[in-house]
Amino acid sequence: MKLLAVPLAAALAVAFAPKAQAQFGVKAGVNVAEMTGRDGEAASYKTFYHAGLIFQGTIAGPLSIQPEIQYSQQGGSLKGALTDYDTKLHYFTLPVLLKLTLGPVFVEAGPQFGVLVNATQNGEVQFSSASGSAAYGQAENQTVTDQYKRTDFSAAAGAGLKLGNLTLGGRFVAGLNDINDVKTLRGINDPKLHNRVFQGYVGLQFGK
């Protein structure tokens, strides 16, 4: 959480500096997400959603800094020889983006910090047995939060249009760290399980 406070504090300092221009707003949109990297399982995309708050503070001319806080559902589908299941990851995320606006067009890029609050699985999944070997069975909204790391660090980049108070945008978010934290099963704790999310969104912003 300390990592989240540093970029947010910097953004607020810029926005509330003398003569700074600031806008606040809300946003919501679609996540098309997958998790990549687990050997022996084919990943595919699932559709989720995100919603949150926007803060934009001008740095100089067309350049601004835009931190957001949002609730974001991510995850995806994974299919192996004996498994076929969907994973839903519930995050609170904080993108902190440098934004360049030229007329109605903008581009943006920066880091995103995520905190996992819950994770569930549905479908034919792999369980652990008393001996520690693999067993398989059907799961329905099985809570698996302890199988994933609580923090996620990503790189985000996107573009869009600003039409008055209305913002239309698209963004790609690429997870940079391993989020897999399985400890109870042997041989499947692959160190390369990453989030990948394509986002489309609509926002409303108000202010100077």
Image: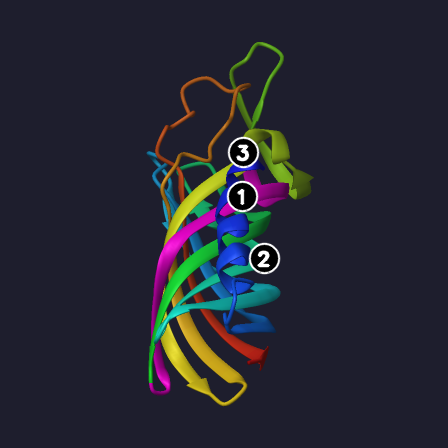
Which structural element holds mark 1? Answer: helix
Position of 75 with respect to 160 (left or right) is: right
As displayed, is residue 93 above or below residue 183?
below
Say which quadrant the N terminus sits in.
top right
Tell me residue 34's x, y (percent).
42, 52
First in sequence: mark 1 vs mark 3: 1
Which sits in the foreground, 113 or 60? Answer: 60
Say which quadrant the C terminus sits in.
bottom right
Q: Amino acid at mark 3?
A: Tyr
Label 3, residues with CA under 10 Å away: few <14, some 14-19, many ≥20: some
Q: Amino acid at mark 1?
A: Leu
Q: What residue sits right under mark 3 in the picture?
A: 148
Foreground label between 2 and 1: 1
As displayed, is residue 72 above or below residue 136?
below
Magenta stretch, main secondary structure class: strand
Residue 192 in sight from this viewpoint: yes
Position of 85 with respect to 107 (left or right) is: right
Q: What residue sits right under mark 2 in the picture?
A: 69
As displayed, is residue 23 above or below residue 70?
below
Is residue 104 found inside the magenta-colored segment of the image? yes
Quadrant of res 139: top right
Q: What residue sits right under mark 1 in the picture?
A: 4
Which structural element holds mark 3? Answer: loop
Quadrant of res 169: bottom left
Tell me residue 146's x, y (percent).
61, 29
Label 1, residues with CA under 10 Å away: few <14, some 14-19, many ≥20: some
